[in-house]
Amino acid sequence: MVLLIVSIEKETNKVLASLDVCINNNDPFCLKTSTYRKKTFTGMLTNFFSFTSFYKVGLIRALVDRAYTINNSLLSFNNDVKKLTYIFKRNQFPEYLINRVFKMYLDNNGNSAQSDNNNILYFKLPYLPFSILPSLKFPH
């Protein structure tokens, strides 16, 4: 027997936070997305002076990629980069390494974003009222 627990996030103040994405619906003409962190997020990462060496650059690259992928405006991406810089500095990452990885990432990915602006994809997600969810059958 498989137990499936479904939770529903409700929009508050025209903002919906789900998984890693915060969707802002205040503008009637476009949705703004940004990175979402729970209120309990402390910013604690592996300290730069810990034993794991290969993990450090990959961590910076992964979090910059996450911010670049999720944010759909330059302003929110810039705010995320500032937050990430602060978080990495608190975990004793050297500023030169943070800036070098940010620059390498943007050099490799920044140019492709300008050419992809014409490839906009739209997804229509159906609304399922809560009363329907218990009657849905999920495969085991």
Image (cartoon, helix red, strand yellow):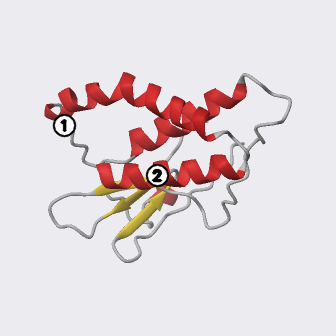
Q: Which residue occupies the extreme right position in the image?
A: 51
Determine which of the numbered discs, if any, sits on residue 120 in the image: 1
Determine which of the numbered discs, if any, sits on residue 80 in the image: 2
Left or right: 138 as drawn, with respect to 27: right
Q: Residue at x 17, y 67 (%)?
A: 28
* Nearest to the observer: residue 109 or residue 10: 109
Where is residue 38, by image quadrant? Answer: bottom right
Which quadrant: the N terminus?
top right
Determine which of the numbered discs, if any, sits on residue 105 in the image: none
Q: Residues within 10 Å of mark 1 (few under 14, many from 20)?
A: few
Q: Which residue occupies the extreme bottom position in the image?
A: 13
Sooner in the amino-acid sequence: mark 2 or mark 1: 2
Where is residue 30, by image quadrant? Answer: bottom left
**Residue kind at label 2, given as amino acid type:** Asp
**Residue kind at label 1, given as amino acid type:** Ile
Q: Residue at x 69, y 43 (%)?
A: 2
**Residue 79 screen position, x and y as percent:** 43, 56
Instruction: For marks 2 and 1, give the CA distance.
Output: 23 Å
